[in-house]
Image (spheres, helix red, strand yellow):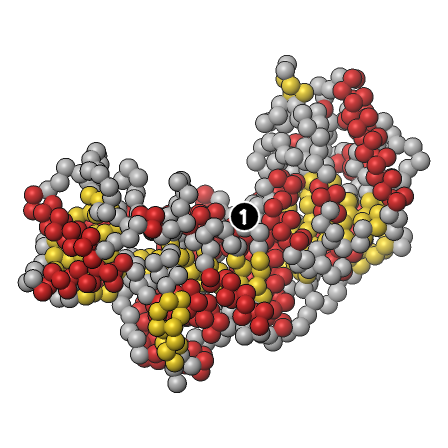
Amino acid sequence: MEAESIKFGKNLVTREEFVAEGHSFCVGCGEALALRLASKALGRNVIIANATGCIEICTSPLPVTSWRVPWIHTLFENTAATASGIEAGLKILMKKGKMPERDIKCVAVAGDGGTSDIGVQALSGAFERNHDFLYLCFDNEAYMNTGIQRSSATPYGASTTTAPAGKFSIGQTTWKKNMPEIAVAHNIPYVATACPSYPFDLMKKVRRGREVKGPAYIHIFSPCPTGWRHATDLAIEIGRLAVETGIFPLYEVENGRYKLNVDRPKLKPVEEYLKLQGRFRHLVDEEIAGIQEHVDEGYARLKAKVACFAA
Amino acid sequence: MSKRVGLEASHAAAEAARMADVDVIAAYPITPQTHIPERLAEMVADGELTAAYIPVESEHSALSACLGAAAVGARVFTATAGQGLELMHEVVYVASSMRYPMVMTVCNRALSAPLSVWGDHSDAMAVRDTGWIQVFCQNSQEAFDMTLWAFRVGEDPRVLLPVMVHFDGFHLSHVTEPVILPEQEEVDRFLPRFHYPFALDPDKPMTHGAFGPPEIYSEAKIAQEVAFRKSKDVILQGFQEFGDIFGRYYRLIESYRAEGAKLLLVTMGSFSETATIAIDTKRNKGESVGLISLRLWRPFPFEELHQAAKDAETLIVFDRSISLGGPGGPVYSEVRSALYSEKDRPKVVSFIGGLGGRDMSVKDFEYVIDRGREIAEKGSKELFETVGIRGKVTGIRG
C-alpha cells in the first residue's frame, strides 16, 4: 500500500521513509538530507549498492540497519562493478524464468572519493558496458568519513587534513575534477547535477535517472558542516550559494543535450560562498580572485555547451 | 550415455560451468588468463549457454560483479590466475565472509616480479586464509569434476560458501587429455537448482554487508570459522554423491601405493601424477615409499592427514611456492603443524621446486625422495632444500 503523499505546490512527496530515522549522520549533514530526498524519489523497487563511506557507515552498524529497501555494501572502489553484477544477475534470472519479470532498478551510491578517485575505473567500466543502473555520487568534496582527507573532488584552496593550509601551502593545489563531464564523455543517456537545496529538482532528476534505460549518473553536491567547518544550520544556504555563484551549476545532459536548470542572469561573487566555510578561511583576496576567474570560465564553458547542444 | 572426448583442462572446466547452467560469468583477461572465459564467451555467443557474460574492466571488478550477481541469487562463475587473483584479493575475503556461493577456477601461476605467466602455487598460497573452500586438481577430468562438484557443495544451504578450484597453469590448464563428459540429466540429478535464501528482493528488504563494530566483529568471524569447518561434512557428502552418480569417487587426500609406506612424498596438484612414476620406480627397487596428495586444501583435512601419515616415519613435502622468510614451503608448514601434536609424529622434510613454470621430472622426484630420506636421518643445515634449481642453495636459516 502506498503511503500518503504531501503536496508542495505542484510537487507530491511521499511521507514514506526508506532510510529510517536513528542513523548516525552528523548534525546538519547535507548528504543525509540529499539521501533522504533521493530515496523518496526512488521508491521501494530498488536494490541499493553502497560504497564504503559516510552513508554506509552512518546507516549500517551491525546488528541494526536504516535501510527499508534491499541494500548491499561490499567494498570501497567496486560499487559500480557490484551494481553491474546485480543488474546483469536480475536481467538473466528474469530472462531464464528463474525470477518473475518486474521493474527493479539497481542504484549505486557512493561518495566523491569512491567515485572520482578509487572507484573511477569500475564506474567507467560499468558505463562503457551499458548496464541499466543509476549511480548517485554524493559529493562532500573530501574523504569525510575517514577524517577530511583531500580527494580529487576537493576544490582548489580548501584546507583538508592531507592538504592542509600552511605557511607554504594554500591547501588543495588542484582544481576539482569534473566528474559529471567525465560521465558525459561516456555517452551515457542521462547525466545530471543536483543539490538538496533544490529538493524538487533533485527528486525530479533521481526519478528521471531511475526511468532511463542504460547508465545514468547524478552528481549531488552535499555540504558537510564537519569537514567544511560551517555552522550546522547552513547546509541549505551553502548549497544554494554554490549554485548561485556558479561554483556548482545545476544542469542535465540527456542523450548529449545540455540543459541548465538554474540560470541566474548574474552570478553571485564566489566570496559569499567561500566566507561561510572554515576550510577557505585562509584564502586572501588574490586567491579568491583566482577562484572567481576559474568559476567564471567554467560557467561560460558550460553555457556555451548548453547553447551548442540544447535539449 | 556419458562420452569420452579430448579436452583441454580449461575447456573441461568451462564445460562443467556450462552443464551447471551458470547464470552470470564475469571475467577479465589479465595476463595470464586462460581459455576458460573465452570458451564460455563463445558458448554464450553461440547460444549453447544462456548466461550473462560481463566483460569487466579488471579482476577486482570481475569478482565484485560476482558478488552482486550472487546477492540476487544467480549461479555465478569466474576464472582467474596469478596476478589476477592478487588484484581481486580484497574481494576474495568479502565473497566468503558475506557467504555468497560462487565457483572460481584458478589456473595457478607464479607472481611478479620478475613477471612470469607460468605455473606455480604462489597465487593459491596468497589466498589460503580467505575462507573459500579450496581443492586442487591433478588432471583434466578432475578440472571438470571438481568444478561441477564445487557448485553442489558451495550452494548447499548448510554451506553457502564460495569454492575455489585450483589447477596448475599450463602444466594442466593448457593440456589436452581424455575427459569423460556426463549426460545433462546426470548433472541435473547431481546439482539441484540454486536457491539462495537471502537474495536481495524489494519485497523482503535485507541489508547485506553492514559494518562490524568491535562489539560484533569477533563473533561474526568466529561464526564464519565454525560454519566453514562444518562444511567438511557436505564436502564429503558431495564426493559420495558425485561418485554414486558419475562413478568416480574422490577423497580429501588421495594416495598412491602409500599403504604401509615408511616414507611418504606429499604433493598437491598435477605434479602428483609425475611423482607417482617416481614412486613406481622406487617401489620396484624395493623401497618402502608412497605418495599422498592433498585434494582439499581448505578447510584443511587434519583427520585424513593423521590417518594417511599414521604408519610413516618420514614425510617429504614438495611445495611449488616459497613462504619468503618462513619455515619452509607453505604446504610443508601446514602438514608439519598438523602432525606436531601426534605422539609418534613422523619427521617432516621440506622441498621447494617447480617455481614459475619450471618442470619437475621423474628423476627430480627420485632425487627428492633420496635426499629427503638422507635429511630425515642426518639433518640439513637448511630449513628447506630445493630441487631443479641451478647452483648450490645455502643460507636458508632461521
Between A126 and B40, the residue placed more toward the observer is B40
Q: How many marks?
A: 1
Tag 1, which secondary structure?
A: loop
Circle 1 crowding by C-alpha within 10 Å: few under 14, some 14–19, many from 20 = many
Q: Position of residue A32 (x, y in %)?
A: 69, 44
Q: Position of residue A11 (x, y in %)?
A: 86, 54
State the residue lying farthest toward the bottom: B1
Q: Position of residue B165 (x, y in %)?
A: 38, 61
Residue B210 can be seen, yes or no: no
Quadrant housing residue A76:
top right
Q: Position of residue A225 (x, y in %)?
A: 69, 33
Q: Residue at x 84, y 47 (%)?
A: A258
Q: Residue at x 19, y 40 (%)?
A: B383
Q: Chain of mark 1?
A: A
In the displayed structure, does residue A112 sit left or right of residue A296? left
In the displayed structure, does residue A131 sit left or right of residue B242? right
Mark 1 sits on what residue?
A: A75
Residue A113 can be seen, yes or no: yes
Q: In the displayed structure, would residue A44 be above or below residue B123? A: below
Q: Residue at x 74, y 61 (%)?
A: A213
Quadrant (top left/top right/bottom left/bottom right) for the N terminus of chain B: bottom left
Between A22 and B15, the residue placed more toward the observer is B15
Q: In the displayed structure, would residue B15 be above or below residue A11? A: below
Quadrant (top left/top right/bottom left/bottom right) for the C terminus of chain B: top left
Q: Amino acid at mark 1?
A: Leu
In the displayed structure, does residue B120 sit left or right of residue A294? left
Between B398 and A305, the residue placed more toward the observer is A305
In the displayed structure, does residue B264 sit left or right of residue A16? left
State the residue lying farthest toward the right: A265
Q: Residue at x 63, y 27 (%)?
A: A160
